Image (cartoon, rainbow, N blue to C red):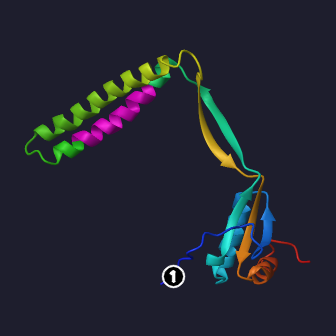
């Protein structure tokens, strides 16, 4: 059974030590994975991102038609779910009609709401995008005086240069 630390961890306190710094999260993740493979107690390790920035990737133009299509797809899934849920409590061949009916009604209402929602913006934000947080640097830090041990393992593994 693992113990839960009652105090929240503060990565900037004096008892924390940086083991290694990486520009890519995947490299920091690989370092922690390698420590785990070497049976290092990884509950003492955290990955701390610094220099955070919001990255918004524009995926395309958003028209009323695309908004309606996206709403229809979302509504169809919800309608299918409701149709399946109601169909579970129905006997006989009517369950197929409930599923198809739920799918079609959900798609119709989803298209209406998608179209209306996009039209309500009045032409502002006529593009689709995805958002993500990214950090400029990722530090692998250790607590409880274990930074030296972790650093030695990562040096042997070639994930950080030897001094």
**For residue 74, side relative to residue 130 (left or right):** left
**Which of the two residues, 129 or 45, is positioned nearer the viewer here?**
45
The x, y position of residue 156, in whole percent, is: 80, 81
The location of residue 33, given as percent across then percent down, is 65, 72
Q: Residue furthest right?
A: 163
Q: Quadrant of the C terminus?
A: bottom right
Q: Quadrant of residue 74?
A: top left
Q: Position of residue 75 (x, y in %)?
A: 35, 32
Q: Which residue is mark 1?
A: 2
Question: Quadrant location of residue 157?
Answer: bottom right
| Observer-nearest of 122 and 93 | 122
Check the image and report above or below for 43 versus 91: below
User: Which residue is drawn at the image coordinates 48% and 17% (left, top)?
Assistant: 119
Q: Residue at x 34, y 38 (%)?
A: 77
* Range drawn in magenta: 69-83
Magenta residue check for 140: no
With 88 as the anchor, is 112 left or right in this view?
right
- Toward the left, the furthest residue is 92
Residue nearest the viewer, comparing 100 with 123 = 123
């Amino acid at each position: 059974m693992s113990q839960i630390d009652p105090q929240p961890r503060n990565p900037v306190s004096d008892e924390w030590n940086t083991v290694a710094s990486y520009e890519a999260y995947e490299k920091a993740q690989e370092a922690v994975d390698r420590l785990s493979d070497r049976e290092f107690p990884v509950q003492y390790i955290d990955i701390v991102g610094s220099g955070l920035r919001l990255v918004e990737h524009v995926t395309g133009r958003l028209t009323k038609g695309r908004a309606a299509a996206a709403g229809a797809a979302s509504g169809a899934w919800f309608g299918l779910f409701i149709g399946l849920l109601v169909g579970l409590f129905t006997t006989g061949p009517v369950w197929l009609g409930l599923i198809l009916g739920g799918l079609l009604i959900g798609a119709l209402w989803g298209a209406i709401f998608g179209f209306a929602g996009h039209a309500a913006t009045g032409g502002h934000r006529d593009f689709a995008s995805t958002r993500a947080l990214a950090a400029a640097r990722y530090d692998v830090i250790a607590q409880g005086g274990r930074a030296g041990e972790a650093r030695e393992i990562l040096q042997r593994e070639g994930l950080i240069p030897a001094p």
